[in-house]
Image (tube, helix red, strand yellow):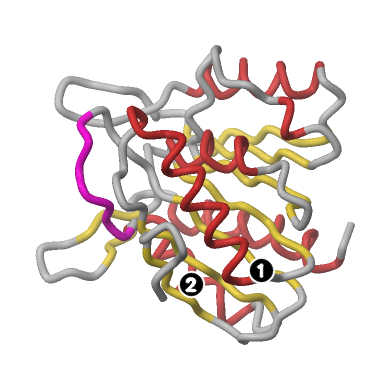
Amino acid sequence: MRLRTGAEMRVTGPADATAAVVCLNAGQSREVEGTWSATLEWLVRRLAPEFPRLTFGEVKYRIKSWQRLDACVDDARGALDALDAPRTLLLGFSMGGAVAILAAGEPSVETVLGLAPWIPDRLELDAMRGRRLRVLHGTLDQALPGIPGVSAAGSRRGFARARALGVRGEYTLVKGGLHGVALRAHWGRPVPLPRAGTWARLVGDELRRFEAGS
């Protein structure tokens, strides 16, 4: 599906669901064309059969870069407009966590679920007021030369800032978790990383809470 911004979205689940999950990818410093996320694709394939009443929308940004963060947020809002669900959970991986937080002020958004979310100290969090923030972060996640990563200490600081604004939420460390849940193999399909099953279970727990409206 082509969004009004020119970004793309891949939809799984019913077209007329009353609740939707918008999945937002990671990014990088260089301004490069958007791609589908192996982590989010693997999670959707794993979890969508358990939640047949939810619609999942995976967003492929026009440009996946934190230098173009505003454009990524516009793409997220375009996905919300296209799905037009009364209730929405934003599922953001890495940079997608920042995108989700900035888009959380849209009326349908109830929850932001960040997977190893990038929440820089300068990121404005006011859009999270009245929403729920759930953060999952791997204990082994860190940036290394040539290897992307987001320190759990950074997302912990961001979560604490949100809580200071009165935002409801939970912060959970995934023991032994790396940066991401899956990588894309050379044949194109996502391959799960260590602790992928734990990530899926925790994401599923939050989706059940969201589906129940609690």
Question: Is 79 included in the stretch rendered in magenta?
Answer: no
Q: Callout 1: few (<14), some (14-19), or many (20+) C-alpha neighbours within 10 Å?
A: many
SS at circle 1: strand
Image location (x, y in percent) of residue 118: 48, 29
Q: Which residue is mark 2?
A: 46
Name the quarter where the N terminus is drawn.
bottom left
For marks 2 and 1, give the one nearer the viewer: 1
Q: Which residues are magenta?
A: 30-36
Q: Nearer the viewer, residue 33 or 174?
A: 33
Under mark 2, the amino acid is: Arg
Residue at (56%, 76%) from the top-left corner?
48
Residue at (63%, 46%) from the top-left corner?
113
Image location (x, y in percent) of residue 3: 45, 66
SS at circle 2: helix
Above/below status of 120 relative to 13: above
Ranked by sequence position, the earlier of labels 2 and 1 is: 1
Q: Callout 2: few (<14), some (14-19), or many (20+) C-alpha neighbours within 10 Å?
A: some
Q: Is residue 12 left or right of residue 165?
A: left
Q: Which residue is mark 1?
A: 20
Above/below status of 14 relative to 87: below
Residue at (50%, 23%) from the top-left corner?
152
Under mark 1, the amino acid is: Ala
Q: CA distance from mark 2 to mark 1?
A: 16 Å
Name the quarter where the C terminus is drawn.
bottom right
Q: Main secondary structure of the magenta part?
A: loop
Residue at (57%, 41%) from the top-left corner?
114
Image location (x, y in percent) of residue 82: 57, 70
Q: Residue furthest left?
A: 186
